[in-house]
Amino acid sequence: RRLKFVDLAFNIMDKDGNGYIEPSEVMDSYDTSKHPDVVSGKKTPQEVLTEFLETFEVGGEKDGHVTKNEFRNYYHNVSSSIDNDDYFELMMRNAWHISGG
């Protein structure tokens, strides 16, 4: 059940269906201009975007693209700290704007 939501979120982000999430696809969904470090002037929007993408590249190649496997690995680690499947589903729906629930 959890993997279904992880894959659904990945597919939402992978707008062109090429099998990986590119920075331009993230920029459509993640507004870095509202990030506290950008607002305060500590970081540029590009720096925040790069850091965001790197959080998904757990055990993968740091190339600025996020593969489905890297995305799954990231959420496997997140999932291990969440006991309740319903809460995990809610978290995924809220994070990636997945309707339903």
Image: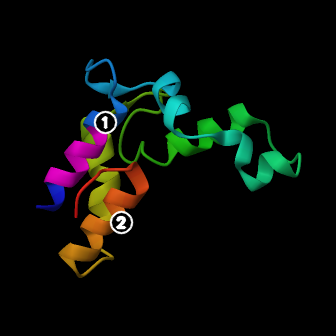
Q: Which residue is mark 1?
A: 12
Q: Is residue 98 above or below residue 1?
A: above
The kind of residue on which mark 2 rests is Met
Nearest to N terminus: mark 2 or mark 1: 1
- Name which residue lies at 39% across and 49% down: 96
Residue 8 in the magenta stretch? The answer is: yes
Report the quarter where the C terminus lies. Answer: bottom left
Magenta span main SS:
helix
- Name which residue lies at 49% across and 49% down: 55
- Mark 2: secondary structure: helix
The kind of residue on which mark 1 rests is Ile
Residue 22 in the magenta stretch? The answer is: no
Write down the region rendered in magenta.
Answer: 4-10
- Name which residue lies at 56% across and 44% down: 52
Q: Is residue 39 left or right of residue 90?
A: right
- Mark 1: secondary structure: helix
Q: Is residue 92 left or right of residue 69?
A: right
Provide residue 33's location: percent of width, then percent of height.
73, 40
- Specify the farthest residue to the right: 41
Provide residue 84's location: percent of width, then percent of height.
22, 80
- Specify the farthest residue to the left: 1
Q: Which residue is mark 2?
A: 91
Report the quarter where the N terminus lies. Answer: bottom left
Provide residue 13's location: percent of width, then percent of height.
36, 34
Q: Is residue 43 above or below residue 62?
A: below
Report the number of discs. Answer: 2
